[in-house]
Amino acid sequence: MTERGRGAIARDQSRFAIGPSSLSWNGRELSIDISEVTVPWPLPLRGKVRVVPTALNPVAFTLDAEGRHRWQPIAPCCRVAVDFDHPELHWRGDGYFDLNHGDAPLERDFQSWQWSRAATRTGTVISYDTVARAGADRTIALHVDPDAQLRRIAPLVDTPLRKTLWRVDRSARADAETSVRVASTLEDAPFYARSHLAARIHGEDTAMMHESLSLDRFQMPIVQAMLPFRMPRRAGWRG
């Protein structure tokens, strides 16, 4: 949100607006209204995303030994409706949303992480592996049923994947002695990748969303110099 100043932001108990775009919560669903201009080509991006959870999860997990970083899978199971006018795009599907928050920059305490989420017949399976700069690495493995009943499970087997075009390391957790395939790489950046995987989870063939983050890469001077070209910054903005 670096391309706009403080005056473009408004927030109350149920709505958060950033310029002409906003998120609002009515107690049952999250509505995301998007009205932006794309870069590098200045084209309109206008539409709405509706996220309807089957239940909400109040449990947050600490990611580091000092308790500076927390992660909460707020809606592990939900339905998503996407309706865009520009470009013309409409679809319905399974979805998820979560929240990371903390008291220190991520790159100070972590080298990297791998995260994945798969929808199965019995609910959502989430794997979250963090590599710490100091202290122990951490693995969180969860099964969440459609009513948001959450339980820890034994971690699945970690399987190396091919690196991205930017040479970011990737790995994902799935059943033992099964293969994990990169169906497509949806976002490929110098320090981050979001991928669509095909894997077997608890005996079921599933589609998996996967995220790889290299915070060693993120804090490299050359990557920091590239960020304003990907995320425009308003004059006078300070991180």
Image (cartoon, rainbow, N blue to C red):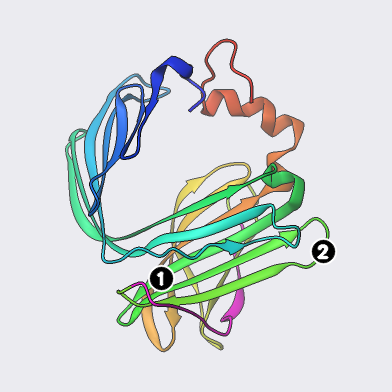
User: In the picture provided, is 163 more to the left or to the right than 150?
Assistant: right
Reply above or below: 51 against 203: above
Identified by mark 1, the residue type is Ala
* Residue at image mark 1: 118
Q: Quadrant of the C terminus?
A: top right
User: Which element type, helix, strand or loop, lies under badge 2?
Assistant: loop
For image coordinates 50% across by 74% down, the residue present is: 180
Which residue is drawn at the image coordinates 67% and 44% (left, top)?
Answer: 103
Percent coordinates x, y for residue 99 in the rendering: 48, 52
* Residue at image location 60% in from the left, 11% down from the top: 236
Relative image position of residue 54 (x, y in whole percent): 26, 66
* Chain part drawn in magenta: 148-163
List the residue tagged with mark 2: 135
Is residue 159 covered in magenta?
yes
| Location of residue 34 by image quarter | top left
Task: Name the residue at the right extreme.
Answer: 134
Q: Is residue 183 magenta?
A: no
Q: Is residue 199 left or right of residue 104?
A: left
| Disc 1 to disc 2: CB gap under 8 Å | no
